[in-house]
């Protein structure tokens, strides 16, 4: 633990930051966004220089892992230069990216060379038509090429993420596990969270709990708890005949807040202390008003620890999502 470690009121050490580099995305996943989205004007978002300053401030405060996310991080112009600069920071052990994979075939080798250590790739269906329906604009073939490119590039960690909706893709859970086994990469299933108001489907009716998904998987592959923690919300399980792990991220059914080691920074420079609450601190104001003042930025971040909430409370209530910001704004 460094002397400047970020510790909150509940004695949790924050050593992981999810940094959103854009709210824009080339997909419109039905659970993540509305079909018609208005994105932020450029003057409201952090510059690449400011994003680097934020990342560096956190690393100087003891953060060991940064995940770049969005929106789709690979649609941000020149994001590679940010990866390069963050990747060179002393003290940062892991620099990861969460992506829809559509542009990975183009970027994977350069990202690896720039210092990226891991990628999470979202894939909710292996059926082309269904994939398009769920993402509204996505092309499965490109994503599959992207997954192969990430494997070829040799990242030390690659994980697939899938959000399962009842009646839409819950019949593909075993296919997705088989796909991950064939590719030799881990896969996590995420319970849909009530972030942003959507009218494409009822979140309550589509809800599939992690326990239901585990039951489906166990009809083919008995799972044993791996008792390995990656410091994240995934609960990992192993199969006897495969090196890969199956994870479950269960913000509804298995609360993991007591283990929370992370904060998020939106591309507007809002430091969000909790995924499921609105407690936040404006870092953009500090960055704009006091450019280059690393001490002030660190002080602001340290001060924010006092308002990190103990936990989130998600309810499956379609009429009123507790959190009105969409996942692309939050930094998924
Ligand atoms: N564009 C990138 C991607 O597709 O992975 C990164 C951003 S995306 C918001 C990050 C992850 O959040 C994806 O795996 C996506 O499936 C997940 N996600 C988005 N909205 C969600 C929601 N309402 N509930 C649960 N997961 C969600």
Image: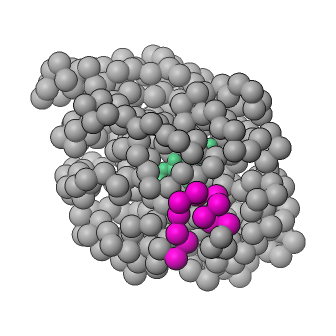
* Residue drawn at (75%, 41%) of the image: 203
- Residue 128 drawn at (x, y percent): 62, 73
* Magenta span of residues: 130-141
Q: Measuring from the top left, give residue 114's x and y in whole percent.
A: 24, 64
* On screen, residue 152 above or below 170: below
Relative depth, front residue between 152 and 225? 152
In the rendered image, which quarter is residue 109 located in?
Answer: bottom left
Q: How is the image coloured?
A: one colour
Q: Residue at x 75, y 69 (%)?
A: 172
Residue placed farthest to the left in the image? 292
Residue 2 in view, yes or no: no
Furthest toward the front, the residue is 36
- The residue shown at (34%, 44%) is 21
Q: Is residue 16 above or below residue 315?
A: below
Q: State the predominant SS element of the stretch in magenta.
A: helix
Against 18, residue 234 (above or below) is: below
Asked whether residue 89 is in view, the answer is: yes
Count of numbered circles on the image: 0
Q: Position of residue 68 (x, y in %)?
A: 38, 49
Residue 134 is a magenta residue: yes
Residue 36 position within the rendered picture, expressed as x and y whole percent measured from the top left: 53, 42
**Considering depth in this image, is 321 or 11 the residue closer to the camera?**
321
Residue 275 falls left or right of residue 170: left
Instruction: Point out the image quarter for the N terminus.
Output: top left
Q: Residue at x 54, y 51 (%)?
A: 28
Q: Is residue 216 magenta?
A: no
């Amino acid at each position: 633990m460094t002397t400047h470690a970020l510790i909150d009121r509940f004695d949790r050490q924050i050593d992981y930051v999810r940094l959103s580099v854009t709210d824009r995305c080339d997909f419109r996943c039905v659970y993540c966004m509305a079909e018609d989205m208005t994105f932020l004007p450029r003057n409201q978002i952090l510059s690449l220089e400011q994003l680097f300053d934020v990342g560096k401030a956190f690393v100087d405060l003891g953060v060991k892992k940064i995940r770049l996310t969005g929106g789709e991080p690979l649609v941000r112009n020149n994001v590679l230069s940010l990866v390069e600069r963050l990747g060179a920071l002393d003290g940062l052990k892991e620099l990861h990216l969460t992506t829809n994979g559509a542009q990975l075939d183009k970027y994977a080798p350069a990202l690896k060379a720039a210092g990226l250590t891991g990628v999470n790739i979202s894939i909710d269906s292996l059926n082309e038509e269904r994939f398009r329906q769920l993402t509204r604009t996505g092309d499965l073939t490109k994503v599959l090429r992207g997954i192969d490119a990430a494997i070829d590039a040799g990242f030390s960690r690659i994980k697939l993420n899938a959000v399962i909706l009842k009646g839409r893709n819950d019949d593909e859970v075993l296919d997705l596990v088989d796909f991950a086994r064939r590719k030799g990469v881990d896969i996590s299933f995420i319970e849909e969270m009530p972030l942003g108001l959507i009218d494409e489907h009822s979140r309550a009716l589509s809800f599939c709990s992690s326990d239901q998904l585990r039951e489906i998987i166990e009809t083919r592959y008995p799972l044993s708890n791996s008792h390995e923690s990656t410091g994240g919300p995934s609960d990992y399980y192993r199969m006897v005949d495969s090196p890969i792990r199956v994870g479950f991220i269960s913000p509804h059914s298995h609360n993991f807040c007591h283990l929370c080691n992370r904060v998020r920074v939106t591309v507007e420079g809002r430091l969000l202390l909790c995924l499921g609450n609105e407690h936040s601190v404006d870092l953009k104001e500090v960055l704009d008003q006091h450019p280059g003042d690393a001490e002030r930025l660190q002080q602001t971040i340290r001060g924010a620890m006092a308002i990190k909430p103990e936990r989130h409370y998600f309810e499956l209530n379609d009429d009123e999502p507790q959190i009105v910001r969409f996942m692309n704004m939050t930094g998924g």
